[in-house]
Each structure stands twice: as C-alpha cells, then as structure tokens.
Image (cartoon, rainbow, N blue to C red):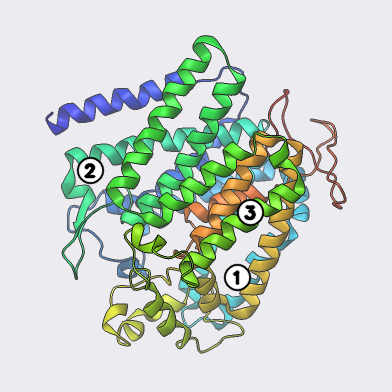
Amino acid sequence: MPPPVATIVFTFGILGLFVLARDRTAQTSKALWLPVAWLLINGSRQVSLWLRTGPRMSSLSDTGVDGSPLDAAIFGTILVAGLIVLIGRRRQVKAVLRANLPIVMFFAYCAISIVWSDYPFVSFKRWFKAVGDIVMVLVVLTDPGTSDAVKRLLARVSFILVPISVLLIKYYPDMSVYYDAYTGRRLVSGVAMDKNMLGMGCLVFGLGAWWQCLEAFEDLKGKERIRRLIAYGTVLTMAIWLFHMADSMSSLSNFIMGSGLIAMSRFRLARKPAMVHLAVAAVVGVSFAALFLQVGGGALEAMGRNATLTGRTEIWSSLLQMSNNPLIGSGFESFWLHNKEIWARGDFLVGVNEAHNGYLEVFLNLGWIGVTLLAVLILTGYRNVTIALRQDSEAGGFRLALFVVAIVYSFTEAGFRPLSLTWIALLLAIMVVPKNPKLNVPVSTEGQNADVSVIAPRPARAWVS
C-alpha cells in the first residue's frame, strides 16, 4: 500500500476508534483536551522535532540548555490554560493539594534544589514544565466526571499515538527507524524518540486498553459491548505488536505484570488486604531479585538480556561515583547538563542521558533528601491505592497496576522523570480527591485524615478514593 493511501486509511481508522468508543452518558468538560494535548506531546516528540526537516536529534542533551522557543511557547500556553481552569476550581484544588502533601513536599524540594544547581535558569525552566504534570493531573481529577475523565484521557491519546506509531513504522521508516551507533542494530521508535520511550507509551496505553476491555466485557451488553471491545481491542493488539517491534523487554514484562494485577482485582478474594500486599510484594520482589540478585536462573537470558542488563550495571557503577553532593544532589534535572564531563568518564557512557534507573536518577539530581521524599510519596501513594481497591475493584485495580508498574519499571528506566508517561501515570494513580459536598456523599477512607469521595455527577466507577 502506498504511504499516502495508508495515511488516509489510518486517519479514517482513528476516527472510527473514536466513534466506536463513544459514551454519550459520560460527562466530562472540554478542559480535558488540555491534558490530552500534554500527553500527546510528552508521549511522542516535541512539536519542533515533528517540524524538523534535518536529521533526528541524537539525544536529549542536544537541546538541553537552550531549548526550543516554539516548544516553550506551546508548553507555556497549555500550562497557563490549565492554570486558568484550576483557578475556576480553586476550592477543589486546594483540598486536593492538602490531601496530597507528600507530592507537594516533593515538588517543593525540587524547587528549592534549583538554588544549588550549576544551571539555575535551565533547572527552573524544567521545574516549571514539571509543574505542568501536576496541573494536568489536577485538571483530570477535578473534572466533574473524574472516572470518565481518566478513561477519556487515556482513550483519546492512545487512539492517536498507537495507530500513528504503527503507520510510521510500516510506511514511513525514515521517521520511525534508526540504528544503534555502536552495534548498527535496527531499532524502531514509532511516534516516540526511541524504542524505550515507545515501549513506555505502549505500557501505559496498553494497560488502559486492557482495563477498558475488561470493563466493557463485564458491564456492557449488546452492540455497546461489541463497539467498545473492537475499539479497545484494536489498540491493545497494536500495542502488543509495537512491543514486539520495539523489543522493549522492560515495558513488555511490566505490561504482563500489570495486566495480571488488573485481572486479579476482579476476584473478591484478591481484594483482601493480605492478598493485595502479598501480590504486590511478589511482583516487586521477584522483579528485584531477577534484575539485581540474579535469582531465577536464565530468566534474563530467556528475555534476550544479559547479566549486565544491556550495560546498565556498568552505567550505574560509574554514575554512583560521580555524585558530588550525595545529600542534596546536583539540583533539579541538572546532573545531565554536565554530559560532556560524564561522557569523558568512559566509552560506554557516551550518548547516555539518563541513569536507566528512576531511583538513581532522583539520587543524582536531588540526593538522599530527594530519595527520602520520593519514598514517602510512594508509601503514602500505596496506602491510597489499596484503599481505592477495597472501595472499587475495577478502578482500584487499574490504579494498583499503574502504581506497581511505575515502581518496577523504574528499576531499569528513569521512570520518575518529569514529563514522562510513567511519572504522570503514577501521579494519576496515587492522588486522592477529598469529598466535595456539592457533588457527592462521603466515602470511608478507613482512618485517613481527609474525608474522601468520588467526584462524579452520576453513579460511576470510582477513580479517586
């Protein structure tokens, strides 16, 4: 099929997905298009790169200091629009922020760390963008139909990015295929910057499609069920194909684990606190043991990886020796601004622009204080997720899957970096929304200080706890 014809076919196919998945009973605001635009950019490439006619950007560091005025204007416009929306919902926003103080404290410390960054202006710009993640999550969670807003957010973005990735790989290889500088190996990126980023997108959107497939199968009947299953099943099938093409084993293994958790949450026995803790401990513990303790025999080799995790262990060992400020770090998103000095330490570091470990990435930029605040954020977030699971098995199960895959994914990738899909997904999963007496009745939080409920104008599956 000629590329222009394929483009037309995929365009109508994407429109068809929107039609098939439509839900006339869902009540969401038009402001939801702001986080959709935010995820479309951060789940693919910045607009300046889509408009480029020259060669691909080899690494994030190529624009690490100066940045692009066009991208800055676009990010700034979306962020300001989001803030305007939140000003209109300021009472809800204040309540949400009070109920999620660990997240507020983490971002506050990120802002303070700008003071000791060697590039304070660049660090501040990156922090300002990072705040955009919180703004967009708040736009979603304060929407009049929170659960519907989450579903529509994931559906709208996945209906666009996943099919276009398939289109680019099959019909526009010059835009989606690149070669490893050292091995010459052919790699695919789809709409993303590289294969790992493509895998990250497939992980998040694949889990969203799986969640909505199960919900459609169990809760709907007749033509409505068939329509939804076709729409989300198509996205799920494409995501699995992209996993294969990208050969991103971190994302694929996390997708399998997350899908299992979502399915498990449908059973009453699996929602008991002891069973939830056991399942989470098993998933995280087995992953940690296989990756770092070399337990499990040839598990890594069977997945096509070696004991060094494709060179990651060498990278981690070297980076741990480069931290000059172990207590406070280099400053928010500042460590890799010294990339020329880092690359000079060893051939295997040349071109590397992330630690390939989310916890190490936080340590390098924010030190032990940042790691401690991240740990508090994770622990309180897990509490919120388990409470949500007991209140609503379907939405809570999806939140649990997002939480666990973000934790495990960050063992081998920088999953906590601002503007990344796993980080945004983690924030969506762990944040709670306090009761709004004008919209709903309280839901027990079993000991939490904040009285928490779902913000939804109609009987719907709870998203927030």
Q: Amino acid at mark 2?
A: Ile
Helix, strand, or loop for circle 3? helix
Classed neighbour count for the residue bearing mark 3: other residues with Cα under 10 Å, few (<14), some (14–19), many (≥20): some
Asked if marks 2 and 3 touch (Cβ < 8 Å), the reply is: no
Q: CA distance from mark 1 to mark 3?
A: 29 Å
Left or right, residue 275 beside residue 68? right
N-terminal of the pair, mark 1 or mark 3, is: 1
Left or right, residue 63 beside residue 230? left
N-terminal of the pair, mark 2 or mark 3, is: 2
Q: Residue at x 51, y 38 (%)?
A: 208
Whether residue 190 is visible:
no
Q: Nearer the viewer, mark 2 or mark 3?
A: 3
Residue 205, how many percent across, how many down?
46, 41
Classed neighbour count for the residue bearing mark 2: other residues with Cα under 10 Å, few (<14), some (14–19), many (≥20): some
Q: CA distance from mark 2 to mark 3?
A: 35 Å
- In which quarter of the view is residue 339 placed? bottom left
N-terminal of the pair, mark 2 or mark 1, is: 1
Q: Amino acid at mark 3?
A: Val
Residue 169 has which mark?
2
The residue beneath circle 3 is: 280
Compared to 320, does 27 lie above or below?
Answer: above
Q: Nearer the viewer, mark 1 or mark 3?
A: 3
Between 60 and 196, the one nearer to me in the picture: 196
Q: CA distance from mark 2 to mark 1?
A: 37 Å
The residue beneath circle 1 is: 110
Compared to 274, does 168 lie above or below?
Answer: above
Asked if marks 2 and 1 touch (Cβ < 8 Å), the reply is: no
Dividing the image into 4 quarters, which one contains the C terminus?
top right
Most distant residue in the front direction: 297
Whether residue 352 is visible:
yes
Compared to 362, does 52 lie above or below?
Answer: above
Residue 99, how many percent across, how many down?
77, 53
